Image (tube, rainbow, N blue to C red):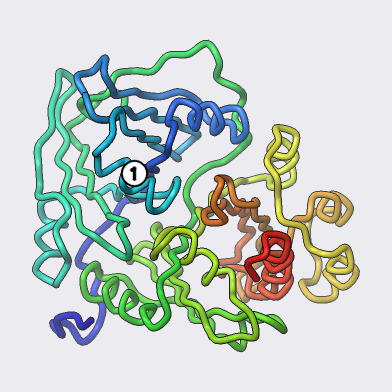
Amino acid sequence: MTLPKLYAQAQDFMPINGTDYLELYVSNAKQAAHFYKSAFGFSSLAYAGLETGLRDRESYVVVQDKIRIVLTSPLKSGTDYGRHIDQHGDGVKVTALWVDDATYAYNAAIERGARSYMEPVREEDQHGYVVRSGIYTYGEVVHIFVERNNYNGIFLPGFQKWETHYNPEPVGLKFVDHMVGNVELGQMNYWVEFYEKVMGFTQILSFDDKEISTEYTALMSKVMSNGNGRIKFPINEPAPGKKRSQVDEYLDYYEGAGVQHIAVATDNIIDTVTKLRDRGVEFLRVPGTYYDTLLDRVGQIDEDLAPLRELGILVDRDDEGYLLQIFTRTIQARPTMFFEIIQRKGATSFGKGNFKALFEALEREQELRGTL
């Protein structure tokens, strides 16, 4: 695949204000919404389905601070929603990006070689109007541009407020920090070029198979960011190794490229992870020996070591500061998507010093599944 050689350098010609929402196609949206509320501390926000005039699908929207997740399921057979779930299992379909002008964003992307998913459309109700448009990215993932400057409704036109008695306390999740995509062997640089040329992103970090490897597996990764740094998309591809890597496993079971994990930020990772663990969320664990030399590697940190060791939270430092991070186990039947919880204390990187320990933990999970 090749892209139009329209620009020698990436340009920030497409201002993006932030992540508007993530939409997951799931087999049972109602039950998934309950899971995200009870386990991850989200609250009910909005609903669309039979009661709002839809006949082929229903969607439940849950919210926590600036994070909105739309959970969509088909209501009958023969829909594209059902086909997507049958092929990929539960997973991210839409990464919606908040922009000031969805028509301009769409036209700019199409002119630079993007494939259209959704031409600009004005959607309105008594609360005003939004304009949405969309393009395809890797696999079947799409970016929808959302212009909502003239809308005051609960979520989007077509949705009604979803009021429930059960809305558990939030766990401290604040916003989407970054979202990682897995692509097929040989496709990472294509999608790096796509984000540079089509959306004006720049590559801010690169990791090769020497930096992201264990005795058995390896992968390569490049991190793309928009101009203001609010949208960051690391892109992974597998690299040759003695055994099949986590990316290979993902591609096998997702049956194609897709979103590997969603990283969500917190201001107090110890408190957040404690609450998540107490609500049944399961996390990857690294060996206890990881903490024996932690302070020698990262230097002085504000947190006590004991709770980090107990919870399995990883720490890494870069030139700007340090970060704390932890990864959930996969959250659906297939060994595909998972979440990262991250707290940044100045650091702008992605935990390079933790790659080996993390990937060895992932390999232990693969070994249990018989997919290593």
- Count up the numbered dots: 1
**Quadrant of res 194:** bottom left
Give neighbour class at mark 1: few <14, some 14-19, many 20+ (Cα, 10 Å). Answer: many
Answer above or below: position of 257 versus 62.
below
- Residue 142 falls left or right of residue 123: right
Is residue 85 left or right of 99 when viewed as pictured?
right
Splitting the image into 4 quarters, where does residue 222 fall? bottom left
Position above or below: 213 against 283: below
Instruction: Please tell me which residue is depicted at 41% across the width and 37% down the height of the picture.
Output: 68
What residue is drawn where x is 47% and y is 73%?
Answer: 236
Q: Work out which quarter of the rendered image holds the N terminus and state it.
A: bottom left
Q: Where is residue 361 in the image (x, y as percent from the top left)?
A: 73, 65
What kind of element bears circle 1?
strand
The residue at the point 75 percent across, 40 percent down is: 274
Rendered view: 345 above or below 208? above
Decide which of 197, 220 is in the foreground and name it.
Answer: 220
Kindly indicate the quadrant of the structure image that contains residue 342.
Answer: bottom right
- Look at the image and tell me in which quarter the C terminus lies: bottom right
Q: What residue do we see at 28% from left, 47% from top? A: 98
Instruction: Looking at this view, name the residue that lies furthest to the top.
Output: 165
- Where 146 sits versus 364, above or below? above
Q: Where is residue 83 in the image (x, y as percent from the top left)?
A: 31, 46
Whole-percent x, y for residue 224 in the image: 39, 71
Query: Residue 168 at what x, y percent from top left?
Result: 60, 22
- Residue at numbered disc 1: 20
Amino acid type of the residue tagged 1 in the rendering:
Asp
Q: Is 266 or 118 nearer to us in this picture?
A: 118
